[in-house]
């Protein structure tokens, strides 16, 4: 009599590493000065520097991560700098 073939267990799912919530400030260049917070109740994300008190806020969605807020801040800084360069 033959033995029934048992199904192999599927491999365990890999866990995603947590993304950073602390970044370097584009104004004072402090290594871990910018902290991002997400307020899902009001759908607002805020990135603020603890050293130079600069801050940036933007609208968020359910999929927004702190890195997205920081990236939008950097993009906005570059956009403003490019507009100033074009005027000069």
Image (cartoon, helix red, strand yellow):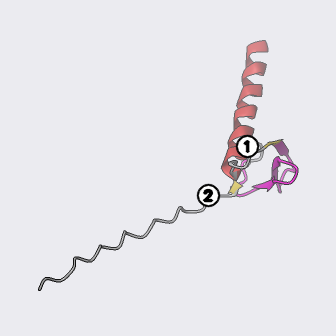
Q: Disc 2 marks which residue?
A: 19
Report the disc number at residue 26.
1
Report the magenta residues as a range: 29-57
Could you tell me which residue is drawn at 73 percent across and 43 percent down?
26
Image coordinates for residue 9, horizontal then vertical, percent: 35, 73
- Asked whether residue 88 is in view, the answer is no
Provide residue 17's location: percent of width, then percent of height: 55, 62
Badge 2 element: loop
| The one of 30 and 18 positioned closer to us in this rendering | 18
Q: Is residue 1 left or right of residue 63?
A: left
From the viewer's side, name the closer residue of 71 and 81.
71
Crowding at label 1, few (<14), some or many (≥20) Cα neighbours within 10 Å? some
Query: Could you say which quadrant of the image residue 51 lies in?
Result: bottom right
Furthest residue in direction bottom, as rendered: 1
Q: Nearer the viewer, residue 86 or 69?
A: 69
Image position, residue 57 (x, y; %): 83, 43
Q: Residue furthest top?
A: 87
| Residue 88 x, y percent position in the rendering | 78, 14
């Amino acid at each position: 009599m033959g033995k029934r073939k048992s199904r192999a267990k599927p491999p365990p799912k890999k866990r995603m590493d947590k993304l950073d919530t602390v970044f370097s400030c584009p104004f004072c260049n402090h290594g871990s000065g910018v902290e991002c917070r997400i307020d899902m109740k009001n759908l607002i994300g805020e990135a603020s520097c603890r050293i130079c008190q600069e801050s940036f806020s933007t609208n968020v969605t359910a999929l927004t991560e702190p890195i997205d807020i920081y990236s939008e801040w950097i993009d906005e800084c570059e956009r403003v700098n490019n507009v100033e360069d074009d005027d000069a």
